[in-house]
Amino acid sequence: MRFLVRTVVPVAPIACRIGLGLCALWPLLSGCQLFDRGVSAIRRRTAAYRPVHKAHSPSRHSRTPPSREIVRLEATFVERPINDPLWGPALWREADEVSDLDPGLRRKLRQNGFRIGHLGSSPPRPLAKLLGWKKEIPDDRSTRSRRQPVARPVVLHSGDSADIQTSEWLPTLTLTLPGSADDKPSTFQHARCVLRLSASRLQDGWARLEFVPEIHYGPRRWRSVSTQTGWSGRTTQKIAPLYDHRFTIDLSLGEMVMISVDPHRRDTLGRHFFVEPNETGDVQRLLLVRLVDLTTAKPIYSQ
């Protein structure tokens, strides 16, 4: 007896067959947009990690630094015996003893021994002799006790400052600082007296000079110092500034300011700044600062 085995293959409905056919044709009909969208998504995710290339990035040399005003000064020290007749009234008679200062400040400076004068471009005859511009008959005593005046250039950016040391290095300096609460003398080790000079350009041909008396003392150490352009490091000592004695003077080109001490006032702050003991007698100093020029610093790189 034979048995016939019939295999029955299920047949999908017509609607299902049409749907399967459309699914197979969809990539061809869409123009492979499925793959393009995948690539675009990858690009978007990796774009955040790629360097950004600007159309133009100027180099370090093409950045033009700003121009800066330059104040050129000359500082000259004159030394003579403290009882030299050239230090007399004739020297200060032709100088304006800074009448534009506040009367209270001017009185305080005089009480503490400082004497300040404003001069024109031509120094008076006694000062010309002190500078060696006028011939005089030398004597052995004055020649041994003084150094020949030498003008030293001081070049500052407008707003910057420089230290001018007015005394010798002192192993020990004992004095009563003006304005101290207890009026007790202070002792400074390895000290020197300094005038901090700041210069600022006012207008064409005019500059303002500011002087602050300071006591520098102690060991020299590397310190961070604030400047007009930021912080910089340099070797300095501890500083005791005397802001109560700060004064300013406006100079035009060629004019000068002279700063010294009243020799008739003893045991004053100014005497520590401008009088040096000597074997043959005390020596008095005079500081002369002249405004030489005002210029503008041009940038090095222009392209």
Image (cartoon, rainbow, N blue to C red):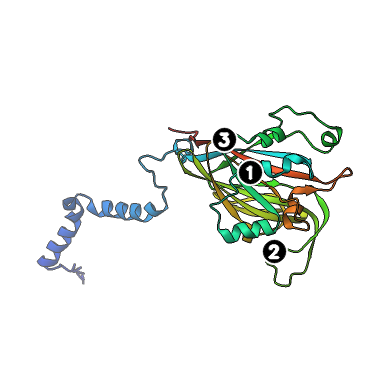
Give the distance between the C-alpha atoms of the residues marked 3 and 1, in whole angstroms.
16 Å
Residue contact at pointers 2 and 3, CB within 8 angstroms: no
Nearer-N-terminus badge (3/1): 1
Residue 130 placed where, x, y %? 71, 35
Asked whether 175 or 142 is in front, the reply is: 142
- Contact, CB < 8 Å: mark 1 with mark 2? no
Direction from residue 51 to residue 9 in the image, left or right: left
**Count of picture labels:** 3
Which numbered circle lies on residue 93? 1
Tell me the residue at 78%/58% (across/down): 267
Spatial CA span between label 1 and label 2: 28 Å
Where the N terminus falls, by quadrant? bottom left
* Crowding at mark 1 (Cα within 10 Å: few <14, some 14-19, many 20+): few
Q: Quadrant of residue 303?
A: top left
Three-letter code, disc 3: Ser
- Residue lying at 42% horizontally and 47% vertically, measured from the top left: 51
Q: Which residue is mark 2?
A: 178
Image position, residue 54 (x, y; %):
37, 43
Where residue 292 appears, as percent x and y from the top left, is 57, 35
**Circle 1: residue type:** Arg
- Foreground mark, 3 or 1? 1
Is 197 situated above or below 108? above
The answer to whether 153 appears left or right of 48 in the picture is right
Contact flag, marks 3 and 1 (Cβ < 8 Å): no
Q: State the separation of the CA atoms marked 2 and 3.
A: 34 Å
Residue 178 vertical placement versus 122 (above, below):
below
**What residue sits right under mark 3 in the picture?**
121
Amino acid type indicated by mark 2 = Pro
Which is more N-terminal, label 3 or label 2? 3
